[in-house]
């Protein structure tokens, strides 16, 4: 089995590559190192079953050659993180839409199974208790940059479904909910690595807004295991599938837990959203997945708890 991972030097892609190599798969990674980094794949770079290509998914000739040779594609290459999308909206939109268009077109041409990795961002500011794949998407106005990422991922999903319906391309769309674990960087705004670094240095913990917003953090290896199990399920094809834990935590509670775990002297500093992202920024108050579809397809139990996730990340940083 030969698998192509676009964005394979990124945080999730590199963990997925490791899991696939552990199972004896042949893996090709393509990554332009824009948000990914070579250090993420240091541990596997000498594996004889791994090929690393530092290039972009918009290099259509190269992508065509690899897709022709591989059996399965995980398309993870994308601009990630609210911070990056707020700072570079053109780059984010172009990359997310154009990259997916190329991958889908070539997967369709060579009839290869392809995972389009989407995000819980697409649910937007919906206020439901938990989000189901068939729910309406409640995305804000186009004058607010934040929603550009959600809109680009929604377009990717529509495009993938169009290929499935019109050309019978075997696509599987997954929506990931706040995936976290070792090697995730806080550089693009992600909250857990940021809080852990701040607490370790006894600096103020930067809680945006009132900290009452909540998230369900999912351990990266629970996500990669699910991605691999889904690839073996024909019933997954043509579906949009949430992948995420249902353990909900408020951002303020998260900050306090991290302070306690690191025995830190940090204080909590509440920062209004407009000071971070400018006027008119809208955050999501809650974001919890309904995973009944996922559980009907694969075993999705015994997930790593948030406390254990935090311990693993803290240890991986050597703190
Ligand atoms: N957040 C925060 N302080 C930070 C970084 C993020 O309070 O230094 C908040 C952010 O506003 C959001 C939550 O933490 O409500 C999760 O942010 P992240 O960027 O990790 O993921 P998101 O859920 O926004 O995609």
Image: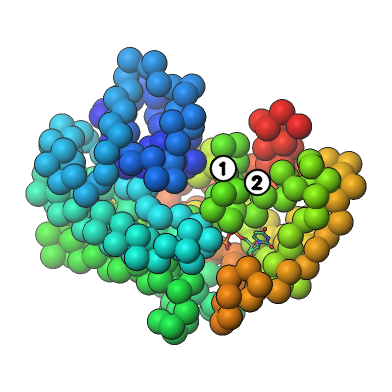
> Which residue lies under the disc numbered 1?
184
Which of marks 2 and 1 precedes in the sequence?
1
- Residue 24 lies, with reference to residue 165, above or below; the image says above
- Residue at position x 58%, y 80% in the image: 279
Q: Nearer the viewer, residue 172 or 48?
A: 48
Counting from the top left corner in percent of width and height, residue 298 is at 46, 46
Residue 99 place in picture, x, y as percent: 26, 54
Q: Distance between the residues labelled 1 and 2?
A: 7 Å
Q: Can residue 269 be seen in this view?
A: yes
Q: Which mark is residue 193?
A: 2
Image quadrant for the N terminus? top left
- Residue 198 located left or right of residue 12: right
Taking the image in four quarters, ligand 1 sits in the one at: bottom right
- The x, y position of residue 53, in whole percent, is 28, 31
Return the residue found at the far left: 109
For the residue pair 45 and 307, the one nearer the viewer reads as 45
- In the image, residue 35 sits, relative to residue 296, either above or below, namely above
- The answer to whether marks 1 and 2 mark residues whose Cβ atoms lie closer than 8 Å is yes
Q: Residue at x 78, y 68 (%)?
A: 270
Secondary structure under tag 2 reads: helix
Image quarter where the C terminus lies is top right
Instruction: Judge whether residue 234 can be spotted in this image.
Output: no
Q: Is mark 1 on a helix, strand or loop?
A: loop
Identify the residue at horizontal 43%, vertical 83% (top origin).
Answer: 143
Residue 172 position in % (x across, y down): 32, 53
């Amino acid at each position: 089995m030969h698998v192509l991972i676009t964005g394979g030097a990124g945080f999730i892609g590199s963990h997925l590559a490791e899991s696939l190599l552990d199972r004896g798969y042949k893996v090709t990674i393509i990554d332009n190192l824009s948000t990914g980094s070579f250090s993420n794949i240091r541990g596997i770079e000498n594996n004889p079953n791994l090929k690393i290509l530092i290039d972009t998914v918009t290099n259509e000739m190269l992508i065509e050659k690899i897709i022709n040779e591989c059996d399965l594609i995980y398309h993870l290459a994308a601009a990630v993180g609210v911070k990056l999308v707020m700072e570079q909206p053109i780059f984010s939109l172009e990359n997310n839409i154009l990259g997916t268009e190329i991958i889908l077109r070539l997967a369709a041409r060579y009839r290869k199974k392809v995972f389009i990795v989407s995000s819980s961002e697409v649910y937007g500011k919906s206020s439901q208790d938990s989000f189901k794949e068939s729910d309406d998407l409640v995305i804000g106005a186009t004058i607010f940059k934040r929603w550009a990422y959600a809109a680009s991922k929604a377009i990717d999903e529509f495009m993938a479904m169009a290929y499935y319906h019109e050309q019978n391309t075997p696509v599987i769309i997954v929506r990931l909910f706040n995936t976290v674990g070792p090697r995730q960087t806080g550089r693009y705004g992600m909250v857990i690595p940021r809080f852990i670094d701040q607490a370790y240095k006894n600096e103020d913990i930067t809680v945006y807004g009132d900290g009452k917003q909540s998230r369900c953090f999912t351990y990266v290896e629970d996500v990669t295991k699910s991605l691999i199990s889904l690839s073996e399920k024909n019933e997954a094809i043509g579906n949009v599938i949430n992948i995420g834990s249902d353990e909900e935590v408020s951002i303020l509670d998260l900050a306090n837990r991290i302070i306690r775990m690191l025995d830190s002297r940090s204080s909590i500093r509440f920062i209004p959203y407009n000071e971070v992202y400018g006027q008119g920024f809208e955050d999501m108050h809650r974001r919890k997945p309904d995973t009944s579809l996922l559980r009907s397809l694969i075993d999705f139990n015994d997930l790593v708890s948030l406390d254990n996730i935090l311990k693993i990340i803290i240890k991986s940083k050597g703190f």
